[in-house]
Image (cartoon, rainbow, N blue to C red):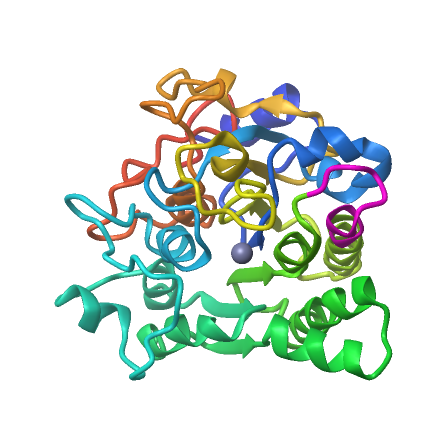
């Protein structure tokens, strides 16, 4: 198989070949897929630069457009309900301090488990306090955890006189600071980074797509924060040229205007799914590379690309097998190259 890297270089100049030493999954909470078009390359330059292959028309869980069921799916490669479902249907942490496994009544393996058992260092950086559920559920396989709380911090900052848009971004800045401080470039890593400001903006003033809206400023501020992460990667000898990145979201928003409670409406279920493999954002269509998936238009779709596909894609990019018990991309056939990633 010696010729494969050479072939890749010929096919996709500037892009890197798997396996990668580091994979970073970024979840931009409340980011609608069409936001990438509305704000364009000028407004969201970093997000666009990450679009080596991707789509603005990926899907959430088919029955849930809330944070917790979708993030559980993104970490386990499962849908919330049905056979093999992860079973976490509420949008809260467990008030009694329980775990996902206790709720399900059985094992619930995550991509952190698979990575950790292969000696890959695992990181969870969360922007909402309820992510403590994930910390407790996978505490034995999570090496580094930092969970912030968007609403607590933003409320305090507004009371202290900070403008609302800056206050919404402040907790995400702390999360990114924590990532850049703690990310060990010398050891293989799987990193989950959750940035919550756009969701906070949407709940405050609506999923308003006018250019200078609070939602837009939160997206642009989040884009700049991801730019800090990219600059860090490119300046680090251990990370540069060895890191792949997946950017997606837990849900969109706007139905109703200040919420995302309508899993049957596209504004809530259509989300981005972008994969950066070291190129410069050529914008290849992920559906064209994956004819086994069907571009769903504005429908829910029968075989769309989902945020929960990212878990087993991340593992494939690290050269690792799929998560035991997972149902989404469990054969790891979601292609980000002209041939399977592993
Ligand atoms: Zn929300």
269 in magenta: no
Name the one closer to the observer, 240 or 53. Answer: 53
Residue furthest to the front: 256
Name the one closer to the observer, 178 or 133. Answer: 133
212 in magenta: yes
Whole-percent x, y for residue 306 in the image? 42, 37
The C terminus: image quadrant = top left
Whole-percent x, y for residue 303 in the image? 34, 24
The N terminus: image quadrant = top left
Give the residue drawn at x 60%, y 39%: 32
Q: In the figure, residue 102 lies in which quadrant? A: bottom left
Whole-percent x, y for residue 29 in the image? 57, 54
Give the residue drawn at x 63%, y 79%: 152
Please provide the residue range marked out in magenta: 208-218
Name the one closer to the observer, 261 or 182. Answer: 261
Looking at the image, is 220 positioned above or below residue 176? above
Give the residue drawn at x 36%, y 55%: 69
**Residue 78 is at least partly visible in this image:** yes
Q: Is residue 96 left or right of residue 3?
A: left
Whole-percent x, y for residue 297 in the image? 49, 18
Looking at the image, is 115 positioned above or below residue 95? above
Name the one closer to the observer, 291 or 120. Answer: 291
Q: In the image, ligand 1 is in what quadrant?
A: bottom right
């Amino acid at each position: 198989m010696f010729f494969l890297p050479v072939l890749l270089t010929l096919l996709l100049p500037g892009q890197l070949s798997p396996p990668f030493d580091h994979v970073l999954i970024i979840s931009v909470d409340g980011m609608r897929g069409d936001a990438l078009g509305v704000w364009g390359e000028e407004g969201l330059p970093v997000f666009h630069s990450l679009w080596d292959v991707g789509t603005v028309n990926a899907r959430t869980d088919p029955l849930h457009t809330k944070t917790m069921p979708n993030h559980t799916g993104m970490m386990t490669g499962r849908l919330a309900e049905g056979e093999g479902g992860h079973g976490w249907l509420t949008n809260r942490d467990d008030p009694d301090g329980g775990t996902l496994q206790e709720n399900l009544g059985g094992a619930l393996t995550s991509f952190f488990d698979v990575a950790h058992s292969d000696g890959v260092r695992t990181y969870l950086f969360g922007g909402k306090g309820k992510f403590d559920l994930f910390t407790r559920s996978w505490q034995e396989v999570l090496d580094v955890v930092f969970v912030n709380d968007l609403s607590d911090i933003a409320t305090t900052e507004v009371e202290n006189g900070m403008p609302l848009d800056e206050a919404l971004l402040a907790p995400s800045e702390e999360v990114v600071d924590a990532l850049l401080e703690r990310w060990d470039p010398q050891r293989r890593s799987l990193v989950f980074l959750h940035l919550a400001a756009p969701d906070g903006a949407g709940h405050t003033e609506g999923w308003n797509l006018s250019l200078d809206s609070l939602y837009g400023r939160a997206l642009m501020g989040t884009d700049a924060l991801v730019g800090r992460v990219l600059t860090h990667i490119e300046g680090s000898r251990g990370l540069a040229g060895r890191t792949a990145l997946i950017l997606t979201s837990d849900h969109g928003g706007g139905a109703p205007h200040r919420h995302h409670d309508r899993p049957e409406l596209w504004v809530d279920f259509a989300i981005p799914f972008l994969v950066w493999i070291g190129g410069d954002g050529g914008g290849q269509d992920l559906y064209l590379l994956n004819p086994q998936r069907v571009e769903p238009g504005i429908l829910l779709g029968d075989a769309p690309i989902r945020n929960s596909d990212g878990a087993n894609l991340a593992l494939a990019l690290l050269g690792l097998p799929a998560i035991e018990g997972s149902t989404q991309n469990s054969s790891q056939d979601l292609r980000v190259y002209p041939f399977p990633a592993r």
